[in-house]
Image: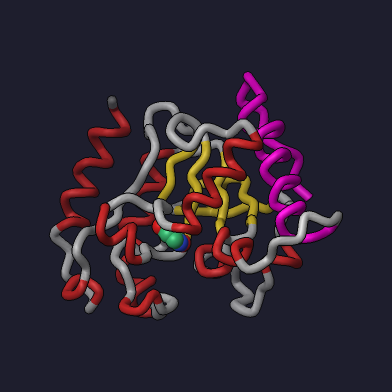
Amino acid sequence: MIKKGCLDIVREKCENCQDCILGKTRKNVVFSDGNPETAKIVLIGEAPGETEDETGTPFVGRAGRLLNQFLEEAGISRQDDLYIINTVKCRPPENRVPTEVEKTLCERFLTAQIDIMNPKAIIFCGATSLKSFWDDKKVQISKVRGKWFDVTVNGKTYPAMAIFHPSYLLRNHSMEDGAPRRLMQQDLAMIKSEILDKSCDAQPVLV
Ligand code: URA
C-alpha cells in the first residue's frame, strides 16, 4: 500500500486545487483509475469529459468504453495492469482541449503521479498527453505511434509509446490492414508482450 498512500496525499492536494479556472466549473477532480500497487504501466489521456466529471473516474464515457474493448481484446487488465490518469484533472468546459496554462498548472500532479508510480512504461493516449512531453508541438500521433522512445520525468527516464486516442477510433471504424483500429490492436499487443509478459525487469528495445 506504499504507492497508494503517497498518491492519496497528492490526490488530496489535487482535490483542493483552485490554481486554474477549471477548478470553478468541475464537479469532480478526476485523479486516476487502476490499482497503483499492481500497475506496471501509466496510461495518460487528455482531460476528463462529461461522464468522467460526473463520476470522478477517467475514461468511463463512450471513448473509455471503446478503450476498454481494445484493452480486453489485447489481454490487458484495466484494473490491475494500468494506472490511468489525464494530463489535466478537471474537465475543460465543452470538452475543449486544455490550454497551455491549464496543462502547466496541473503538471505538478501529473509528474508526482508518474514519480510515485515509477512505471515500467508510459503510454500517451492521444496527441495532448504526448505533446506535454514531446519537444516538437506539431508532432503527429500517426507518425510516432507504435515505436518506443525515452521520456524523462523529474530526472528518471522511462520507455514510452504513443497510441491513438479512442475518440479518434470512434470516428474511424475500418478494420482493414493499416487502419487506425488495426494499428491500435498492434500497438496494444506490443505493449502487452514487451512490458506485461516479461517477468524480469528488462527494458524494451528502444528505436
Ligand atoms: N478522454 C480522455 O482523454 N480522458 C478521459 O478521462 C476521458 C476521455
Q: Is residue 86 above or below residue 97?
A: above
Q: Where does the image place residue 143, in percent across and percent down from the top left? A: 76, 67
Q: In the rendered view, how is the structure colored?
A: secondary structure
Q: Residue at x 55, y 64 (%)?
A: 167
Q: Is residue 195 above or below residue 144?
A: above
Whether the magenta-drawn stretch holds residue 201 is answered as yes
The picture quadrant for ligand 1 comes to: bottom left
Which one is nearer the viewer's eye here, 124 or 166? 166
Which one is nearer the viewer's eye here, 52 or 42? 52
Q: Is residue 126 left or right of residue 104?
A: right
Q: Residue at x 19, y 44 (%)?
A: 9
Q: Quadrant of residue 137?
A: bottom right
Whether the magenta-drawn stretch holds residue 19 is answered as no
Q: Where does the image place residue 198, in percent across and percent down from the top left? A: 66, 24
Q: Quadrant of residue 138?
A: bottom right
Q: Residue at x 75, y 45 (%)?
A: 186
Quarter of the image that includes the N terminus? top left
Q: Where does the image place residue 74, in percent across and percent down from the top left? A: 65, 36
Q: Is residue 69 above or below residue 197?
A: below
Q: Where does the image place residue 78, in percent across and percent down from the top left? A: 48, 37
Furthest residue toward top: 199
Furthest residue toward right: 177
Q: Which residues are magenta?
A: 178-207
Which one is nearer the viewer's eye here, 18 or 159? 18
Furthest residue toward left: 16
Which one is nearer the viewer's eye here, 153 or 15? 15
Q: Quadrant of residue 88?
A: bottom left
Q: Is residue 192 left or right of residue 155?
A: right
